[in-house]
Amino acid sequence: ASGSRGQHRCSKGQVVRAMGKKGKAPVPEAEPEAPVEDPTAGGWTCAECDYEHLEEEAASGECVACGVERPAQEVGRFAGYKVGLVLACEDFSGKLKALKVDVGEGEDAALNIVTNAGNVKEGCRVV
């Protein structure tokens, strides 16, 4: 015997839900993105001479003490990622490859990375 809409009673008297199409799941609201801070806001410290720039001096593109250019700041969702250039790629074991990757700190500071990515070769850029 049928009960209320979408439910039926089985032979043991238990209420079971009818099989069939389910309604659409509610779409969750997108979280608002965090506001990206102005990279020129706030002070910064020169890596060359350790001069601490005040907030008023922060908009300047170079150090007021030694003239060295202000380093680029990582902002937004890509902060913390680095792009590297594959300097060397050799087969390691089976599908694995040993890479020597320069991430902008000079060839002496190149990273040794092991990967199983088949599309990596010398001269490629990796993240």
Image (cartoon, rainbow, N blue to C red):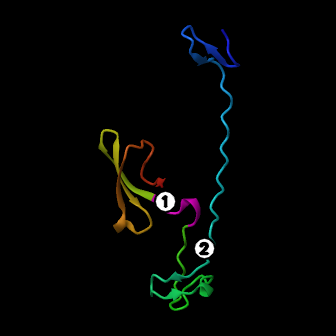
Q: What x and y, as percent, mark residue 52?
A: 50, 87
Q: What's under tag 1, amino acid-wise? A: Val
| Mark 2 element type | loop
Q: Residues within 10 Å of mark 2 (few under 14, many from 20)?
A: few
- Which secondary structure is most common in the magenta stretch? loop
Q: What's under tag 2, amino acid-wise? A: Pro
- Residue at the disc numbered 2: 39
- Residue at the disc numbered 1: 83
What residue occupies the far right of the structure in this picture? Answer: 5
| Mark 1 element type | loop
In the picture, measured across the screen, residue 108 lies left or right of residue 9, that is left
Q: Is residue 63 magenta?
A: no
Span shown in magenta:
75-84
Residue 72 lies, with reference to residue 110, above or below; the image says: below
State yes or no: discs 1 and 2 in contact (Cβ < 8 Å).
no
Relative depth, front residue between 116 and 6? 6
Relative depth, front residue between 10 and 122? 10
Q: What x and y, as percent, mark residue 40?
A: 61, 77
